[in-house]
Image: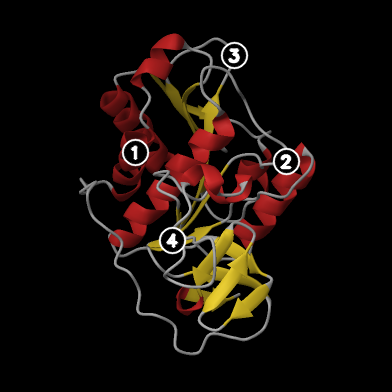
């Protein structure tokens, strides 16, 4: 399958917040979903927007990224709010080609986390469902303001449930994404690059002798791409390179090995 996956909202236009923070948690789920799908042989595009300053700008950016790719499915990941409990999945209409996946995802999340299954719902007003060209679904994983949901919340388990709902089979949550071979033709041009390692360390200076940075030392944006909070940036993360020093590249959070960067 070829799949678009994105986390809802942006770092500048944040979503719901309560006992859980939607922007932080939906990105943790999104990163793991992408990792598991790729580990199972599927092509995945991360269409998350981190720069939209308003809700409308954020939604337009997401949809534009989604529609840049011809895919089998668009998956939008959110957390809910409003005093309810449980998980639910939205599709555009009952005739949506994503209905089967939506039904399985809701059931899988409910059973995995032990929270209420609110089922599959339809909406013709949700921008992402209305404007994307491919079959789309929007997952509301749980409620950020419900104490029961908060206690039972586990981003990794939720991600695994989503993937199993999409693929309609069990997956191994311990499958590791293979580290691609280092790039041998890395561009010298500054600008935006994609990380091609499964986990890329960020260091305080241009060399392996410099100390690795911790999660708390990363920029706010970088933290959203370090789902296990180990101070390493995950595969597919886009970074801005401002300087090269031999085999090392300077990004906002520090220095990374340039052989694991691909120009985009």
Residue tagged by mark 3? 82
Q: Earlier in the sequence, mark 2 or mark 1?
A: 2
Q: Earlier in the sequence, mark 2 or mark 4?
A: 2
Q: Earlier in the sequence, mark 3 or mark 1?
A: 3
Of discs 4 and 3, which sits in the foreground? 4
Residue 146 to residue 74: above or below: above
The local secondary structure at tag 2 comes to loop
Q: Using the image, tell me which numbered label, if any, was put on residue 156.
A: 1
Q: Earlier in the sequence, mark 3 or mark 2?
A: 2
What quarter of the picture does the N terminus occupy?
bottom left
Q: Is residue 190 left or right of residue 183?
A: right
Of discs 2 and 4, which sits in the foreground? 4
Residue 220 position by quadrant? top right
Residue 173 to residue 41: above or below: above
How packed mark 4 is, by other alpha carbons closer than 10 Å (few <14, some 14-19, many 20 or more), is: some
Tags 3 and 1 touching, CB below 8 Å: no
């Amino acid at each position: 399958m070829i799949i678009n996956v994105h986390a809802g909202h942006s770092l500048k236009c944040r979503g719901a917040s309560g006992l859980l923070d939607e922007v932080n948690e939906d990105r943790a789920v999104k990163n793991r979903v992408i990792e598991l799908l790729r580990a199972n042989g599927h092509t995945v595009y991360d269409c998350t927007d981190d720069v939209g300053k308003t809700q409308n700008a954020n939604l337009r950016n997401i949809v534009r990224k989604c529609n840049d790719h011809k895919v089998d499915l668009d998956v939008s990941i959110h957390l809910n709010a409003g005093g309810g409990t449980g998980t639910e999945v939205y599709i555009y209409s009952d005739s949506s080609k994503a209905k089967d996946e939506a039904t399985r995802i809701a059931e899988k999340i409910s059973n995995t986390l032990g929270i209420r299954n609110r089922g599959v719902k339809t909406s013709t007003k949700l921008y992402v469902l209305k404007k994307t060209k491919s079959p789309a679904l929007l997952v509301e994983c749980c409620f950020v303001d419900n104490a029961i949901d908060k206690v039972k919340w586990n981003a990794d388990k939720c991600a695994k449930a989503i993937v199993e709902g999409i693929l309609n089979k069990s997956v191994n949550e311990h499958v590791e994404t293979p580290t691609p071979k280092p790039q041998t033709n890395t561009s010298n041009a500054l600008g935006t690059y994609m990380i091609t390692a499964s986990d890329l360390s960020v260091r305080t200076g241009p060399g392996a002798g410099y100390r690795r940075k911790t999660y708390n030392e990363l920029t706010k944006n970088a933290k959203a791409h370090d789902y296990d909070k180990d101070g390493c940036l995950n595969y597919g993360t886009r970074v801005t390179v401002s300087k090269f020093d031999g085999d090392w590249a300077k990004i906002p959070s520090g220095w990374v090995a340039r052989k694991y960067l691909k120009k985009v």
